[in-house]
Image: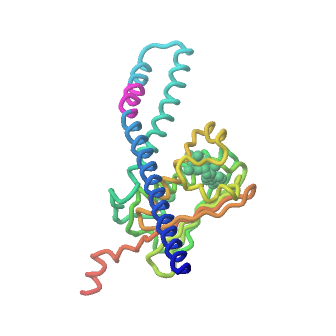
Amino acid sequence: HTVFVSFLRDITHQVQAEADLERARDEARAGEKAKSDLLTVMSHEMRTPLNGILGSLELLKRDPLSERQLRSLRAAKLSGDLLLSHVNDVLDLSRFEGVQEAAANVPFDLPELVEGLMTAQSAPAKARGTALRAQYLTDGLTHVLGDPAALNRCLVNLVGNAVKFTQDGEILVEIERLQDGATVEIRVSDTGSGIPEDKIDSIFDEFVTVDPSFGRESGGTGLGLAITKRLVTRMGGSIMVDSIEGEGSLFQITLPLPQVEAPLQAAEAEVE
Ligand code: ADP
């Protein structure tokens, strides 16, 4: 009898504990959603007046202004642009959450996309004394199927970070098609500051920056990697990081980017 009662008590406790846990999880989810909704609404509401301010500043530039007025105008424009990019980041973060928008699936030239990125990032890298280069480890990457805009956004974030956190070092972007033929690995490695071990696990979370003062100075919000991870997930891929503080970092994206079938004319020519 005593054994049975204690058994019942155990079961009751267990059921109670599970219910408590589930309630706590529900509350946490509701809290997350409230936070995300608030950010989205705020960003939306901020974007229109902000664009109004930036537009008016542009118009002001056309008037004859003193050197001092022009300097203030440029400073205001710079801060406004930065604020707008943060606001857009917050909006993108909620846009890319879940599966509201499906990833595109169009043919594109991967090396061409990467070269565009290299061109855009070469000046900032050079300004920091850092060498930036891309290496293609396999052929057949010129006709792939995927979401070039989303992939570009991810690579801009990863290479942009590598540039930002590397001084007088090297950045290498490696692209390789895996044996299965449909998967491509893109690795962005740098010899920069690296990420402390205790931060690695949270680096893809929203608003996480290793050094907040540096983040503020460099205009970082800690949203770039969160957006990147959501985009990669939406494209059906995965992202991982490996880093040693003081030595450098490696970010790797693994993505389904199947090769486009041979062009139609070629296929027809073969049949004839
Ligand atoms: P941020 O806008 O601050 O760059 P991210 O989400 O892109 O936001 O990155 C979050 C943080 O991760 C950065 O503030 C930085 O501390 C760290 N980090 C990201 N990439 C690198 C890198 N290549 N080297 C060193 N630290 C990095």
Q: Quadrant of residue 260?
A: bottom left
User: Can residue 188 be seen in this snapshot?
Assistant: yes
Furthest-right residue in view?
A: 246
Q: For this rendering, which residue is in front, 49 or 56? A: 49
Tell me if 228 is positioned left or right of 134 in this view: left
Q: Is residue 188 above or below residue 77?
A: below
- At x 73%, y 56%, the residue is 245
- Classify the position of the C terminus by image quarter: bottom left
Say if residue 161 shows up in the picture: no
Residues 141 and 42: in front is: 42
Furthest residue to the front? Answer: 1
Query: Can you say whether 236 is above or below 98 in the image?
Result: below
- Residue 34 part of the magenta segment: no
Part of the protein shown in magenta: 46-55
Residue 119 percent across, percent down from the top left: 54, 51
Asked whether 12 or 75 is in front, the reply is: 12
Whole-percent x and y of residue 76? 51, 24
Q: Relative to the observer, which residue lies in front, 80 or 205?
A: 205
Estimate the x, y position of residue 248 in percent, counting from the top left.
Answer: 70, 58
